Image (spheres, grey):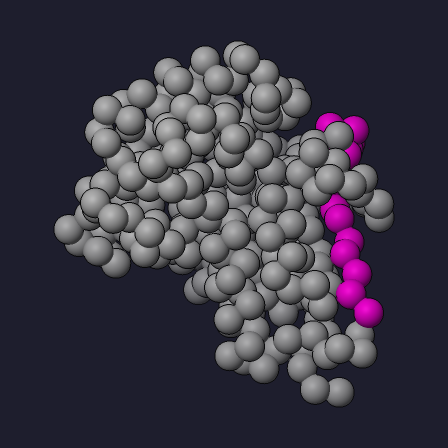
Amino acid sequence: MLGDARPIGVFDSGVGGLTVYRALRARLPQESFVYLGDTARIPYGTRSPETVRRYAREDAEFLLRCGVKVVVVACNTASSLALTLLQDECPVPVVGVIEPGARAAVAVTRVGRIGVIGTEATIASTAYPRAIQAVAPGVQVWARSCPLFVPLVEEGWAAHPVTAMVANEYLAPLCQARIDTLVLGCTHYPLLAATIQQVVGAGVTLVDSGACAAQEVAALLEQRAAVAPPEAPPSTRFYVTDASDRFRSVATLCLGEPVTQLEMVRIGV
Ligand code: DGL
């Protein structure tokens, strides 16, 4: 059998990474997946770099035990703080969301003024501005953390007027900076894309880092002749680290369908 039938591993601090899984599945419908949502320890976005790195390492170890052929770090916070560490330690390729998002933003900006939004830890890490300026040193970047966005999405309030008010408040400085491109640097933010677009206006292009990472994974598998063989039927296993009611409801939001095959696991300690 040609190719590689092993699944693609995806991890996130919780359910938001399903936006990345959704993009991966759309781009790679023939592939099998193992998704780990570390729901017992979410949020990562308010934690110290050391803690995020420890969690990320444990998440990747779990996926490796599941026999994955590549690890996708769907979580922007973990990608910002732990990607190099995981790439050094893992025996399989590890793909994060920062560089693909940064490259896409550079490709679409017309005026060289890019905004980035993410969790507090992602923004504090400066991973996005560094990745953007590594590709295009002349580009200017404005970064802003939007800590209320994650709980608003998880509350099911993506289209609620409160979310529009919060978005106005957070995004005003970026609008004043006359950005023409905005990187959605957090797993949950694609679910707020309509509200964010309304606030920043149609002249600003939104970049979904997760979707960009899916392209990168597809290219990597092709390069390594590691795409799943057509005769292997694709499947997905979902794992969480804590009771999963919220996971199920937000998962339905993310995927537009209920999640089946959900299992609880213990990782770390
Ligand atoms: N998954 C996280 C991210 O993309 C958001 C939620 C969290 O803070 O853990 O940064």
Count of labels shown?
0
Q: Could you say which is closer to the camera, residue 264 or residue 155?
A: 155
**Where is residue 204 drawn, in percent x and y?**
35, 37
- Magenta-highlighted residues: 233-248
Q: Is residue 229 above or below residue 59?
A: below
| Residue occupying image coordinates x 27% and y 23% | 173
| Residue occupying image coordinates x 23% and y 41% | 113
Q: Is residue 189 above or below residue 158?
A: below
Judged from this view, the residue extending furthest toward the front is: 202
**Residue 112 visible at all:** yes
| Residue occupying image coordinates x 63% and y 69% | 69
| Residue occupying image coordinates x 80% and y 74% | 232
Q: Is residue 37 above or below residue 196?
A: below
Q: Is residue 61 left or right of residue 237?
A: left
Q: Is residue 8 left or right of residue 223?
A: right
Q: Is residue 206 above or below residue 231?
A: above
Judged from this view, the residue extending furthest toward the bottom is: 1
**Where is residue 49 drawn, in percent x and y?**
41, 39
**Residue 241 visible at all:** no
Q: Is residue 101 left or right of residue 192?
A: left
Judged from this view, the residue extending furthest toward the right is: 261
**Where is residue 184 drawn, in percent x and y?**
44, 39
Q: Could you say which is closer to the camera, residue 158 or residue 11?
A: 158
Q: Is residue 201 magenta?
A: no
Quadrant assignment for the N terminus: bottom right
Q: Is residue 235 magenta?
A: yes
Q: Could you say which is closer to the camera, residue 119 or residue 149?
A: 149
Quadrant assignment for the C terminus: top right
**Where is residue 167 drawn, in percent x and y?**
43, 21
| Res 237 quadrant in image | bottom right
